[in-house]
Image (tube, rainbow, N blue to C red):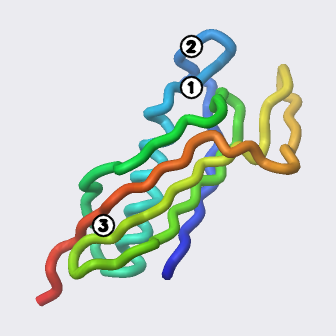
Amino acid sequence: MITVTHRRYVPYAHAHYAGNLVDGAYALGLFGDVATEVCIRLDGDEGLFASYSDVQFRAPVQAGDVLEVTATVTRMGTRSRTVDFTAQVVCRGTGGSAAQVLDPPVVAVTATGTVVVPAQP
């Protein structure tokens, strides 16, 4: 199958809670972005996100993090694709402008979703 990976810095403008925490919807938005690239690569169309069958928030995402978001297609139907998603923190701010690379990365969010694409003529 296919795997697509994006990396994104989480700006402080997205901090929503105390401790510079970012809401879970931020990661879901990134899952939508990486799913779009999956559909473009497989089908030449941006596709549409149909549903999530599972979402797990496993660790906090904070402003100043660098997230690595991965989508792996696990099933291909005629028009639907099942995709497993992972968002992991690969770098984290430690105060001021200081930051560190996390080794190993911290898995923050996992999900399984379904995307659909137009029927091929």
Q: Which mark is residue 46?
A: 3
Circle 3 sits in a helix, a strand or a loop, which is it?
loop
Q: Residue furthest left?
A: 121
**Nearest to N terminus: mark 1 or mark 2:** 2
Q: Position of residue 4 (x, y in %)?
A: 54, 69
**Spatial distance from mark 3 to mark 1, Cα to Cα?**
27 Å
The residue pinned by badge 2 equals 17
**Which residue is depicted at the point 55% across and 35% down?**
57
**Nearest to N terminus: mark 3 or mark 1:** 1
What crowding class fits label 3: few (fewer than 14 Cα within 10 Å), some (14-19), or many (20 or more)? some
**Spatial distance from mark 3 to mark 2, Cα to Cα?**
32 Å
Q: 52 or 91, which is in the foreground?
A: 52
Tell me, yes or no, whether the two marked residues, 1 and 2, touch with CB atoms within 8 Å.
yes
**Spatial distance from mark 1 to mark 2, Cα to Cα?**
7 Å
> Foreground mark, 3 or 1?
1
**Which residue is depicted at the point 48% across and 48% down?**
30
Residue 101 falls in image quadrant: top right
Circle 2 sits in a helix, a strand or a loop, which is it?
strand
What crowding class fits label 2: few (fewer than 14 Cα within 10 Å), some (14-19), or many (20 or more)? few
